[in-house]
Structures are given as structure tokens and as C-alpha cells.
Image: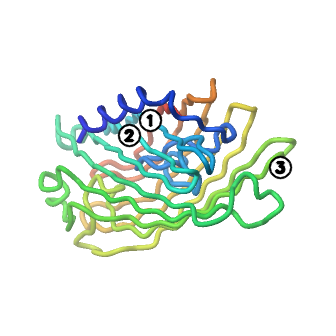
Amino acid sequence: MNKIIIVCIISFLYAAPSFAGDRLLATGGVTQIEGSAGGGLTPWALISGYGTDSQIGASAFYTELRTNGGFDLSSGGVSIGLYNRVEVSLSQQKFGLSNTVPRESIRLDTLGVKVRVLGDAVYDQDNWVPQIAAGIHIKHNEDFSFVPKLLGAKKSSSVDVYVTATKLYLAAIKGRNVLLNATLLATEANQFGILGFGGDKHDGYRLEPAVSVALMLTDNVLLGTEYRAKPNNLNIYKEEDAKDLFVTWFPVRNFSVTAAYVDLGNIADKNNQRAWYLSGQISY
């Protein structure tokens, strides 16, 4: 799968000049951990890339994270936005297990599909209705039998289902744009799926909320914060909700860099796992 991701990114870079997205700066969001357009933690209703309703847009991203307990995460992938209506994404996360299981890692593959159902987050300024999208993340843990199954996880694959609403308020605070997002996920994933799905404590779907707030500090700098609730399915280790504070810089229209401080809570045998992460994204 990692070879597929590399090939997809190279293909994207080769084909990028043929895309001609005309949407406003940052209206494709950044890329969240599972590969969809959104914040770092949660999908937004925005469609990736800069394609309008008559264009095709696309994005490619790569993210690195390392916690204070030595866990490390690398994530990369690509997404295509079709006519500002449908988004298809493909990503892989590789999670290094620190000294919990030395020199070992877990790979999680995610195929995402998102559909904008109604509204326009940017142009419907005279309407209180936000942009609303529904999506799925089809996930497969390549290393399920190694660690997740031993911890009590029940499945190697599952599908997250979500509904998300995003509204961008232009010139809302001292002339600066404000973005609000709320997402509701039906999931049975342990640590986003890195530790498999379902568990000996609870096996089945749970509804988990997520929210994001972001402010355009300048015309090309976005400051935001997010919260994402997660299920607690395993008896052996308690799973806690995730929170972050991020800054995204758009030095040019087609490239952005996101730096974030993220609190992931308990991960396996390590408490209070916090990390800085850095993510780069190319969008057309």
C-alpha cells in the first residue's frame, strides 16, 4: 500500500498542471489524519482542492508526528475533488510503536468518499444553512494480528460513517474570516483504527462528535483548534479524546504548511501523549 501511495503522489505531481481550480484560498481546507479535506483531526464538509462546480481539483499531503512517549506517525495520501461535489481520497498511516514494541509499526490504509449534500460554506453568506456533507472512511489494518488482536480488538477492517457541517463567515471578526465545523462520526475504531476495531469492552459502533474553529489571522495564515471524541473499546487500555491547536500558512496558493500541537491522551501503555506535528500539502 505504501508503494501505491508513492505512485499516486508522483502521478498527482505530474498531472497537477492540468487541474485548474478557481475557488478561494484555503477553501479546500487542509488534510486530516484519515486523508479527507478538513482540519488535522476531523473531516470538514469542504471538498479537497480548488475545483469549482465545473472543475476537478486535487490535493496531496504528507504528515509527520512524534509523541513525548516516542510513538511516531507518518501519513501520506492523495485526494480528488470532482466538481466541488464529490471527494475521493486514499491514504496510509504508519504508526511506530516506540519502546512498547521496539522496532515495530502498524499500517492503516484508508479509502475515503465524501459527497456535498447541500449548501456552500463560502458563497451562501445570506443563508444560515451551512455546507453539509456525508462521507465514509473504509479502513484496513494491515498488521491487525500482530498487536491489535492481542490487545482485544475484534476486527481488522471497518467503515467509519460521518456527517459534517461547515460554515465560513467572511469578515466576521475585525474583518477576518471565521470557520466553524461540527462533525458526527459513527465509528468502532481504536485510536483511529491503528489498534483495530471493536474490542472486548465494547464491540460495535458508537456516535462520536467533533468540532473545529478556525480564524484567518492574515490573508494567508489560519489559526484553529479542534476536538474529536473517540470510543473506548478495549479493557486493557483506556482511550481518551483528541484535541489540537494548529496554524496553517499558505505561502503560495497551491502549497500550505500546517504545524500543530496535539493532545492524544492515553495511547496503549503511555499516558498523556502529546506531540507536535508538521504537515505539507499541495492543492490545485
| Structural crowding at the residue carrying mark 1, measured as other residues with C-alpha within 10 Å and reported as few (<14), some (14–19) or many (≥20) | many
**Front in this rendered view, residue 262 or 5:** 5
Please state which amino acid type lies under the numbered disc 3: Ala
Q: Which of the colour schemes (rainbow, by chain, secondary structure, one colour) is used?
A: rainbow
Of pointers 2 and 1, the one earlier in the residue sequence? 1
Please state which amino acid type lies under the numbered disc 2: Gly
Could you give the CA–CA distance between mark 3 and mark 2, rounded to whole angstroms?
33 Å
Q: In the figure, 255 relative to 27: above or below?
A: above
Please state which amino acid type lies under the numbered disc 1: Phe
Image-quadrant location for residue 149 = bottom left
The quadrant of the picture occupied by the N terminus is top left
For discs 3 and 1, the disc positioned in front in the rendered view:
1
Mark linked to residue 61: 1
Question: Which residue carries the number 2 mark?
Answer: 77
Q: In the figure, 60 relative to 264: above or below?
A: above
| Structural crowding at the residue carrying mark 3, measured as other residues with C-alpha within 10 Å and reported as few (<14), some (14–19) or many (≥20) | few
Q: Secondary structure at mark 2?
A: strand
